[in-house]
Image (cartoon, helix red, strand yellow):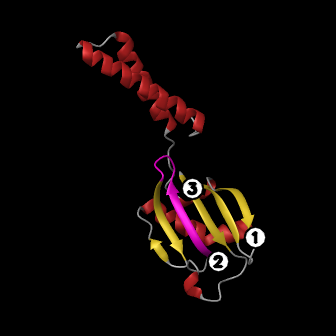
Amino acid sequence: MPAKNTPANATDALNALLDAAEMMLSARADDMLTDEEWDGLATAVAKGRQVLPRIPTEPDEMLATLKVAKTDRRYAGTGTWATGTIAGHDFCALVFPVHALNRDWELGDSRISKLSLTEQGRSTRVAAFDRGWDLRPTTDIAKRIVDLLSAGLAETVFGK
């Protein structure tokens, strides 16, 4: 079973890769590699690969990874900020219990007025909606995630 992408595992993998890189640099300076240096490199690569989780691509699998980590009700208005993860991505969304008066300010029929979607590990923003598209989904997975969040995030946050 692959390791989960937790900060501790990512830090361990990064440290292992850096250790291996240092060994490779010293070996290059000496024009030779020892068995220890080759083993260190092999271990680092194996650890690095374990950290990368498999990102699901089927809607049911993607939805099964949805975790709303935090909801914060806005001080003014009725909206709630929801942050969480889904299918290897972080999201932050401003969700409302009712539809927007101006439908152009809402992502489809979702009750979401703002949404930011970022790839985990790379911190690459792959979609952004702020009462209109700032960045349309840049990958097929980002498009599927936006569709899934649009279809049910408000129900998840407000229970209706």
Label 1: how many residues lie within 10 Å, few (<14), some (14-19) or many (20+)?
few
With respect to residue 141, does 108 lie above or below?
below
Q: Identify the secondary structure beneath mark 2.
A: loop
Amino acid type, label 1: Phe
Q: Identify the secondary structure beneath mark 1.
A: helix
| Residue bounds of the magenta highlight | 112-123
In the rendering, at what x and y percent does residue 137 appear? 45, 67
Amino acid type, label 3: Asp
Q: Quadrant of residue 130?
A: bottom right
Q: Identify the secondary structure beneath mark 3.
A: strand
Q: Quadrant of residue 92?
A: bottom right
Label 3: how many residues lie within 10 Å, few (<14), some (14-19) or many (20+)?
many
Q: Is residue 2 visible?
A: no
Taking depth in this image into account, of 59 and 107 the one nearest to the observer is 107
The residue tagged 2 is: 111
Q: Are marks 1 and 2 in contact (CB under 8 Å)?
A: no
Quadrant of the rendering where the C terminus is positioned: bottom right
The residue tagged 3 is: 90
- How far apart, in angstroms, are the residues tagged by discs 1 and 2? 11 Å
- How far apart, in angstroms, are the residues tagged by discs 2 and 3? 19 Å
Viewer-nearest of discs 1 and 3: 3
With respect to residue 35, does 108 lie above or below?
below
Q: Quadrant of residue 64?
A: bottom right
Taking depth in this image into account, of 159 and 81 the one nearest to the observer is 81
Quadrant of the rendering where the N terminus is positioned: top right
Residue 21 horizontal side relative to residue 127, left or right: left
- Residue most extreme to the bottom: 101
